[in-house]
Amino acid sequence: MRHLLSTRDLSRETAVGILDVAEDMADVAGREVKKLPALRGKTVVNLFFEDSTRTRISFEAAAKRLSADVINFSAKGSSVSKGESLKDTAQTLAAMGADAVVVRHQASGAPSVLAQSGWIDAGIVNAGDGTHEHPTQALLDAFTIRRRLHGASARGRDLDGVTVTIVGDILHSRVARSNVWLLTTLGAHVHLVAPATLVPLGIGDWPVTIGYDLDAAIDASPDVVMMLRIQAERMHAAFFPNAREYSREWGLDDERLDRLPAASLVMHPGPMNRGLEISANAADSARSTVLEQVANGVSIRMAVLYLLLSGTGEL
Ligand code: CP
């Protein structure tokens, strides 16, 4: 596979292979000199049409740790505001010698268009497209779960039998979609919990179970509870009465945190709405992996860039 556009088309073998290369990359992060010469002479373009803190900085750190050159492009302040198209923007950056283009776009499918159009010859990595997918987020989430559960013996393993409950704004969440495909491919059981208004049409075809009661889901003692951000910027209607009501029904508050088994992990892709979908105590607790997820994101993105830009050039 020359591009990483989705987790839906990753086989178990390919996914475990990426996680294992990320383990090697994490070893590099533990060294005094956190740098490898593997991608010297290669250029990675970060093409961001939507805001990002974690993903953009993480791809930049990953590329630099592999000694690649990095060009950061943000639509804000660029000629996109003068009406320049995705095609012309991408071709302009490709003309500067891009070997890989990391794309975040508000339109679902924009990275696939770039990959399939033939406009540019670079490997395309989807860094989040609309409500469609965010594959490196799911890979770093799977990597974080595998490391927490299996520690030093994580290499080569999948997530067979692990129970993951994903809670909140499923409708607008590309993180949820990428995690559903990847975690189930790796053998996990995924349970989704959301208000009925935030459940997408067609969810009956997803390989998950669905519930509407967070307390019942907590009482089932899942291995992982993954809270999703309420994506107010994508909501053009009233999906729940108000923030207080949402928090009371579907937020991971202190009382629910206390009822979770001590070994259960609390995950959130960030950015968090503290006090809305997750309490400050839950976000900062020893069970929270929020900052580990960020650190692991660099290892996963190093693995993806390394696999796409060296050797066979395939995942
Ligand atoms: N999790 C995530 O994609 O965060 P950013 O929007 O900050 O990149």
Image (cartoon, rainbow, N blue to C red):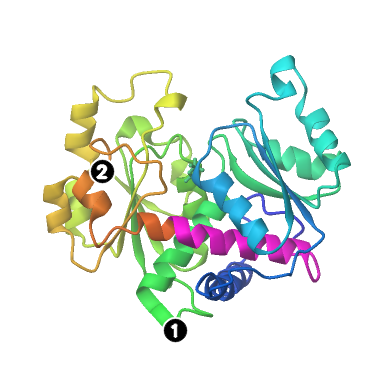
List the residue tagged with mark 1. 153
- Tell whether 232 sits left or right of 104: left
Q: Residues within 10 Å of mark 1 (few under 14, many from 20)?
A: few
Q: Is residue 118 among what the camera can see? A: no
Q: Position of residue 258 (x, y in %)?
A: 12, 56
Vertical placement of residue 129 versus 182, above or below: above
Q: Is residue 219 among what the camera can see? A: yes
- Tell whether 137 sits left or right of 122: left
Q: What range of the chain is rendered magenta?
A: 294-315
Which of the two discs, 2 and 1, labels the residue nearer the N terminus?
Answer: 1
Find out whether residue 253 is within the magenta segment: no
Q: Position of residue 133 (x, y in %)?
A: 56, 44
Q: Residue at x 61, y 58 (%)?
A: 62
Q: Position of residue 119 (x, y in %)?
A: 86, 38
List the residue tagged with mark 2. 278
Displayed quadrant of residue 311: bottom right
